[in-house]
Amino acid sequence: MARRATRLAYNKVGKAGSSELTNVILRVRAARGLPPPPRAGPFHPDAAALAAKLAAVPAGGVWMNHAGHARTADDFAWINLVREPVDRAQSLFYYFVDPVSRKRQKALASERARLNDTACGCGGAEFDACVLLREANGCPLGCSTQQHEAFCAPGARNCSIADAVRALDDDYVFVGLTEEYDLSVAVLERLLPQFFAGASAVLHDGHAVPKVTSARNPATGTRGTGAVSKEARKILMNTTSCRAEARFYAAAKRRFWLVAAAVFGDELLDVARRR
């Protein structure tokens, strides 16, 4: 797939490093004198809108958006990044009330809703404390925004883990890991030089500025820097949604290392150690 690819499709998983990789792709194109891709349109398009957008991508072009997955012609290279599910849930928790990384009005509205829900809202609370509070109060818990759904068709009624893993194996040139970000970019650079040549240098050139959830929230007073406790992690991993996400992440992680080993061979340990 990588050798045949003349078009790139990146259906971005939120809070898995997608803003940073988007910036890298844009800067690589700019360095080559190529224009940025056309605006992708609204997030999570339906199947018809997604098919139309993909069909309009020219040779050498790139399509990027938060979206489901679609079967495409052989000249498309599909890529993505995924993240350990509890860490991603923590990042999402802070993102929704962050007036810096998202629209201020939306962030403040989310915080007001949390404050108004005194039993389950966790207004002004850190993620770890929120998990413990919600468990004590019998509130819903889990990994509600599931990244494996990006590997199924838009609007799929039953996006099973098996379906998502099958798409990952059959249709994706590469799926990187947020926890191995530098190595993920290095693999993309080696696999798809037509889109990523020079990407590792761009990643650290000081110009690719990703959208990152603030470490200290000026609206809520939360800091978002603490590790998730074993107790909170155990509570989450006892939920159906987080267990499912963990199974998908484990499959993605196994494939990541298989692809990385195939790409770098005996060099892999040295490459990984340098990054």
Image (spheres, rainbow, N blue to C red):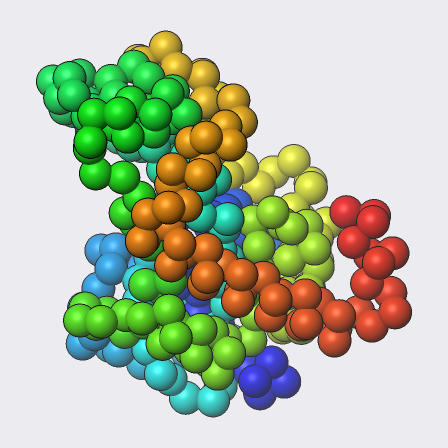
Q: Quadrant of residue 187?
A: bottom right
In the picture, measured across the screen, residue 63 lies left or right of residue 180, that is left
Instruction: State the residue in front, 156 or 79.
Output: 156
In the picture, measured across the screen, residue 147 lies left or right of residue 256, that is left
Instruction: State the residue in front, 35 or 18.
Output: 18
Q: Determine if residue 135 is in view.
A: yes
Instruction: State the residue in front, 113 or 118.
Output: 118
Which quadrant: the N terminus?
Answer: bottom right
**Residue 224: percent from left, percent from top:** 45, 22
Question: How many badges with numbers are in the image?
Answer: 0
**Residue 105: percent from left, percent from top:** 19, 25
Q: Determine if residue 107 is in view.
A: no
Q: Is residue 154 above or below residue 88?
A: below
Residue at 79 percent across and 69 percent down: it is 264
Q: Is residue 138 above or below residue 254?
A: above
Residue at 22 percent across and 71 percent down: it is 158
Residue at 53 percent across and 37 percent down: it is 209
**Residue 255: percent from left, percent from top:** 60, 70
